Amino acid sequence: MQFFTATMEQLSAYQELMRARQEGVTPVSFTGVSQIHKAHLLAALSQTSAPVLVITADEAEARRLCDDVNTMLEETAAWVFPAKEVILTPVEGITTAYEHARIGALAALQNGQCKVVAASIEALLQPTLSPEQLREHTILLQRDGTADLSELTRKLTDCGYVRGDSVSGQGQFSVRGDIVDIFPVQLSAPVRLEFWDDTIDTMHYFDPETQRRTDPLDEVLVPPARETLCDPAELAKKIRMLGKSLRIRRADLVREKLYADADHLEAGMIPVHLDKYAPLLWEQPPMLYDYGMEIVCWSEYGAIVESQRGLMAQYQEDCKLLLEEGSLCRGLEGYYQDPAETAAKLDKRFQVYCSNFLQGGEHVEFQKLLSVQAVQNAPWGGELRQLTEDLQEYSSQGYCTMLCAGSEKTLPILQQDLQESGIRCELAEPDSVWRAGVVYLRTGSLSGGFAYPETKTALITQGRALHAGTRRRKQHRRGEEIRTLADIVPGDLVVHALHGIGRFLGIRKLELEGVTKDYITIQYAGKENLYVPVTQLDMVTKYIGPREDSNVKLSRLSSPEWQKTRSNVRRAVKDMADELLALYAKRERPRALPLSRTVRNSMTLRLGSLMWKRKISWHASTRSSTTWSRNALWNGCSAATWASGKQRWLSVRQ
C-alpha cells in the first residue's frame, strides 16, 4: 500500500540513505529502528529495481520481517530463505521441506516475484543452486504446448522429484496414463496435466485429498527439487581420486566409506548425505547473494556475529568428531563458507546496518551515520475506549494515522463506532490521499505499531493472533520437565534420557512403514539426528547447565560416553546419599552432659529418705573395695531396693 512507502520516503533519514546509495557511500549505520521500523524500511526499499537481502541472527526474526513486509505491501513480496538440514553421514529418514523452501525463494527471485529475501546468517553461509543451474533445470509447461511424456518423466527424476502412485507433498509427481500430477516445490497446491498425445490439453490445480480440480492455469514453472545437482558419474570419479590420494592414519576405513558412496553414484543412486561432497562439486560455490541483490541490510549486527561464532564453533566440533571416526576426511570439511570471504563479497554492495542504537565493538567502519526519531506502539488489544483515546490524541496533534484491524465485514462497524466518537475516519483505498488529522482503516495486522513525530504519521495495529510457529512459551523453572512443545523452540539445548545432550531442531513429519507421524528432531555431534515420536516427550528435558550454549559439547549417538556419564552420576549420588545418612545419624545420637570432677566426687544417690555415700578403702592386695555406710535412718527400705539403687549409682559414676 502506498501509505507505507510514502510515509517512509518523507523521513529525512531515509532521504539521506537514498542519497548515500546514489553516491556510493557504504556502509551506512541506520539506528533508532525496532522490528516494525525495519519492516517499514524494507517495504520502501523493495520498490527499488533490485531485490533487497536482509540478514538476521535467526530464522524467527526473518519470518517476522517477511510477514510484516507482505502485510504492508498486500502481496507476497518478501520470502524467507531458511537454513537447510546439513547431512554429512548416512541416515534413514530426512526432511526436504527446508530445501524446497530455499528453492522456492530462489525461483521467486529469478522470476521477479521476490523483492525482499530474508535469511539467517546460517542460511547465508550455506551454498545453493547457481542462477545458471536453476534456469537450466527449470521446466516450463504451457497449456496447448507439447511435451514428450517419457522425456518429462526423466527430467523430473533428474531434478530430484520422487515418483509415486499419487502426490501428497512438494517434490513428488505421478503418471497415470495420459494424466501427470506434479507438485512443484514453490507452489502450495499440485498441478494436474492431461495430455492428448504429446499436447497438454488441460492444466489445473487440484486438491490432493479429494483429487478434485480447482483453478485452471495457462502455464507452470517446475524448478528442481534438489539443491545439489551434479553428474553422478563425474562426482564418483572425483571421490575415487580423493580416496587414492589419502595419506592419513585411518586411510583404509575412510577409503572404504568413500568408495561405497562412489559405487552408489555409479549405480545411479544419489546418497542422502550429498552435502558431504559439496567441496568437490564447485571450485567457487554458488551462494544466495549471487542472485543480483544490490542492497544488503544487516538486522542487529552484534547478534548476527554472536550467532555466527556459535554456528562455526559447533560445525568445527562436528567435523572434528567425524574426522576421528573416519566418516570425513581433509578436503570435505568445508561445507559452510568462510564468513570473512562472504563479508568481503558483500562489501561490493550497498550495505545498511539497522539497529535500535549504535553499539560499540561492531568493528565496522561506517561511512555515514543516520538516526531516525521513531516510536514503537504496542498492538491494540481490542478495547474500544483505549483505541478511541489514542486516535483522538493523534488526531489532535495533526497525525495521519493508519489503523489495521478487523476483517472486511467488521471494518465498517468499527468505522461507524469511531465516527460516533467524533473521530474522522475513512476506509483506506489504493488511490486515497493521506491527510493530516484523518484515521484510515484497513484489514490486517502487524507485529507492532509505529509513530514518526518528524512527519506526524502513525500506525496502530490489532494484535496478531499467535499461531503454532510463534506461540509464546510458558515460563518454567530450569530443569522442569517439558510438558508441551511450546516449552521449547528450535535451537534450544535438550537432554534425552538415553542419548544425552542435543540441540532441538523442530518437528518433522516422517512416513515410516506407510504411517505418517510427528517426530521431535534432535541434532547430536557429527550432524547426527535423532527422531523421537512426540508421544515420548517425557524422555526429553530442558538442558540446565551453563547458559553459554555455544560452548556446550553435544553428545554422540551410538557412543558409550553418555552411559558412562549416567553411571558416574548415579554412583556419585549414591555416595552423597550415604554420607548424608551417616551425618544425620551422627547428629541424632544422644549424648550425656559432661560433669565436672568436683560434681562427680560429691554425687549422691537418694532412695526414699535413705542416703548413701561412697567411701573408698585400700587393701594390701591392691584391690579396691567399696563399702557403704548409712548416714540416715533406714526408714523401712527393703534390701532389694537398696541393691538396685546401689547398682544404678555405680553406673552413673562410671
Image (tube, rainbow, N blue to C red):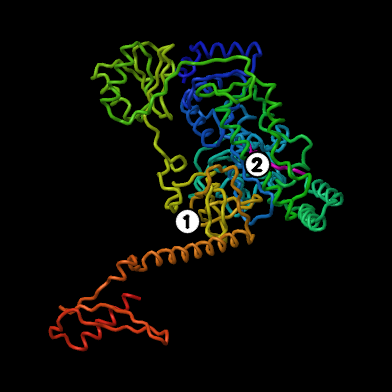
Q: Nearer the viewer, residue 485 or 645?
A: 645
Q: What amino acid is labelled 1 in the image?
A: Leu
In this view, the residue farthest toward the left is 635
Q: Is residue 596 visible?
A: yes
- 197 w.r.t. 510: above or below: above
Question: SS class of the residue under badge 2?
Answer: helix
The percent coordinates of residue 223 (x first, y second) are: 65, 38
Q: Pointer 1: residues within 10 angstroms few (<14), some, or many (20+)?
A: some
The circle on residue 613 is none
Q: Nearer the viewer, residue 53 or 434?
A: 53
Question: Could you say which quadrant of the image residue 568 lies in?
Answer: bottom right
Q: Is residue 179 visible?
A: no
From the image, tell me which residue sits under label 2: 313
- 221 w.r.t. 175: above or below: above
Question: Could you say which quadrant of the image residue 306 lies in?
Answer: top right
- 567 w.r.t. 122: above or below: below
Of helix, strand and loop, which mostly describes the magenta segment?
loop
* Discs 1, 2 touching: Cβ within 8 Å: no
The percent coordinates of residue 291 (x first, y second) are: 67, 28
In this view, the residue farthest toward the bottom is 639
Image-based side of 386 in relation to 198, left or right: left
Q: Nearer the viewer, residue 478 or 599?
A: 599
Of label 1 and label 2, which has the lower sequence position? 2
Q: What amino acid is labelled 2 in the image?
A: Ala
The percent coordinates of residue 61 (x first, y second) are: 52, 33
The percent coordinates of residue 436 (x first, y second) are: 37, 11
From the image, tell me which residue sits under label 1: 537
| Residue 558 belongs to the span the image colors magenta | no
Which residues are the magenta region? Answer: 220-230
Image-based side of 645 in relation to 51, left or right: left
Q: Quadrant of the C terminus?
A: bottom left
Question: SS class of the residue under badge 1?
Answer: helix
